[in-house]
Image: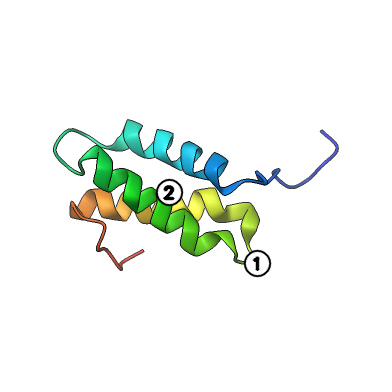
Amino acid sequence: MDRYFAQVPADAEVVVGLVRREAAEECSAGHLPPPELDRCVREAVGELWGSRISTFVPLLALRRVRCCIRAGTCECDDW
């Protein structure tokens, strides 16, 4: 490995896919329906995508989605 930092996907859709997969694995039945989970993931990635901390967009987006899963809605501001 010749790089010290993680490679950042160049496409936001790749990050959306990564976060959606991780969130779906953690989301037990009844917390967030798939359409709302998808909307939540897209929202989280979209808000973070243009930030200066692009290396951590997947991690920060997943953190926000986890908050939504715990709350049962994507109207969570506690992340």
Q: Which amino acid lies under the numbered mark 2 shown in the image of this protein?
A: Leu
Q: On the image, numbered disc 2 is attached to which residue? A: 62
Q: Quadrant of the C terminus?
A: bottom left
- Which is more N-terminal, label 1 or label 2? 1
The answer to which image quadrant residue 27 occupies is top left
Task: Give whichever of 67, 33 is nearer the camera.
Answer: 33
* Residue 46 position in % (x across, y down): 48, 58
As drawn, 68 above or below 7: below
Query: Residue visible at 17% across and 33% down?
Result: 29
**Looking at numbered disc 1 in the image, what kind of residue is underneath it?**
Arg
**Taking 62 as reference, is 70 left or right?**
left
Q: Nearer the viewer, residue 52 or 70?
A: 52
Report x, y in % for residue 66.
33, 49
Q: Is residue 72 left or right of residue 56?
A: left
Q: Secondary structure at mark 2?
A: helix
- Which residue is rendered at x = 56% and y = 40% of the image? 14
Looking at the image, which residue sits at the far right? 2
Query: What kind of element bears circle 1?
Result: loop
Instruction: Please report contact status of discs 2 and 1: CB closer than 8 Å, yes or no.
Output: no
- Where is the N terminus found, in terms of image quarters? top right
Disc 1: which residue? 52
Residue drawn at (34%, 44%) of the image:
38
Q: Residue at x 24, y 63 (%)?
A: 75
Decide: few, some or many residues near mark 2? Use Cα within 10 Å; few <14, some 14-19, many ≥20. many
Query: Alpha-carbon distance for marks 2 and 1?
Result: 17 Å
* Mark 1 burial class by Cα count in 10 Å: few <14, some 14-19, many 20+: few
Left or right: 14 as drawn, with respect to 5: left
Q: Position of residue 76 (x, y in %)?
A: 27, 63
Residue 18 screen position, x and y as percent: 49, 37
